[in-house]
Image (cartoon, helix red, strand yellow):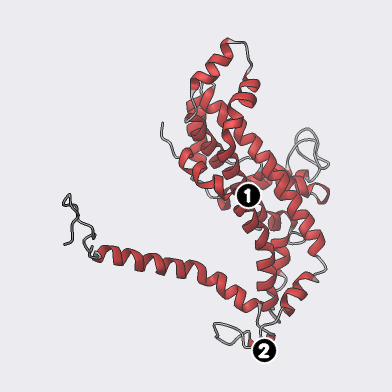
Amino acid sequence: MVTNALGIPLNKPNKKIKPLRVVQIVLIVLWLFIALFPFYWSIVTSLKPLNEIMEFSLWPKKPSLLNYKEALLNPDLAESLFNTVFITVVGMAINILVSLLAGYAFAKIKFKGSRVLFRIMQTSMMLPFAVMFIPTYIVLARFPLIGGNNLFGQGGFGFVGVNTQFFGIILPSCISVYNIFFIRQFFLTLSDELGESARIDGAGELRIFGQIYLPMMTPAVATLAIFAFQAGWNNYFWPYILGQGSFKILTIALRQYYTAVAPEHGVAMAFNLLITLPMIVFFIVFQRYFMSGLSAGAVKE
């Protein structure tokens, strides 16, 4: 080994690659392949002409953008896009506002029964939406004084009528117990002394929330926006049930390409990739805050 005048070695000793490290690298590469291959296959299928769709090939012989052209010429595209953007943006904005206020109340305001109420909310996180959608439908259909209903929720259609479907689709997405829990955990990382000092100076809770704590919530709000945007943009089940398949949003418009007579796999893949782009762009814009928001929200009491 070559050393300098002080006896410090100049060349680093060769480190042997540990077998466990090799296994980890192989598993990571395998996981990446499994995760990314369906997306790659969607791209390949969207570029295939009709006569190559059923052939197994890692790249089309004659790549074509015809499927994208047909997807963009969908007669329901404009209305579906407007409805999807409206439902997603409005639902996301209300969801963020409700989650911030509720998370702040549970984390920073001491009131009687707060812990019991929070534990009940946590319990509801274990219930899948498939179990909750029938009670949710009944509540919206029997909502008093809406959609022709009387004070007792009878005589009309509530929020499931043709004229009130927009609100019926948005309302269930306005509150997320998981998002409230996530924001509460983030608030717990912020110092209580800041709020207590402001209360001594005579500030109200809304002012403390808006001027002191909210400016420090940027990573949490960005992370919450990604969750809420993804949930609204990819929503299919609830709009399909409420609108009985006739309500026009992008995820339901995608379904028309999978007919039993002649499924258009190439156009469907092109349409699917087009409606996925906004979600990817939205994530790229906010991803710098995403990891910091998740790590901060993982704090324990």
Q: Position of residue 131 (x, y in %)?
A: 56, 50
125 sits to left or right of 81: left
Q: Position of residue 144 (x, y in %)?
A: 76, 36
Q: Quadrant of residue 40?
A: bottom right
Compared with 74, 144 (above or below) is above
Q: Are marks 1 and 2 in contact (CB under 8 Å)?
A: no
Q: Position of residue 87 (x, y in %)?
A: 73, 49
What's the amino acid at mark 1?
Ile
Compared with 201, 22 (above or below) is below
Q: Position of residue 220 (x, y in %)?
A: 56, 39
**Viewport quadrant of the N terminus:** bottom left
Q: Residues within 10 Å of mark 1 (few under 14, many from 20)?
A: few
Q: Nearer the viewer, residue 6 or 253?
A: 6
Residue shown at 50% from the left, 31% from the top:
118
**Residue 183, can we see it?**
yes
Residue shown at 61% from the left, 21% from the top:
208
**Viewport quadrant of the C terminus:** top left
Q: Quadrant of residue 31?
A: bottom left
**Residue 235, can we see it?**
no
Q: Earlier in the sequence, mark 1 or mark 2?
A: 2
Q: Quadrant of residue 238?
A: bottom right
Residue shown at 48% from the left, 27% from the top:
116
Q: Which mark is residue 134?
A: 1
What's the amino acid at mark 2?
Asn
Q: Secondary structure at mark 2?
A: helix
Label 2 sits on residue: 51
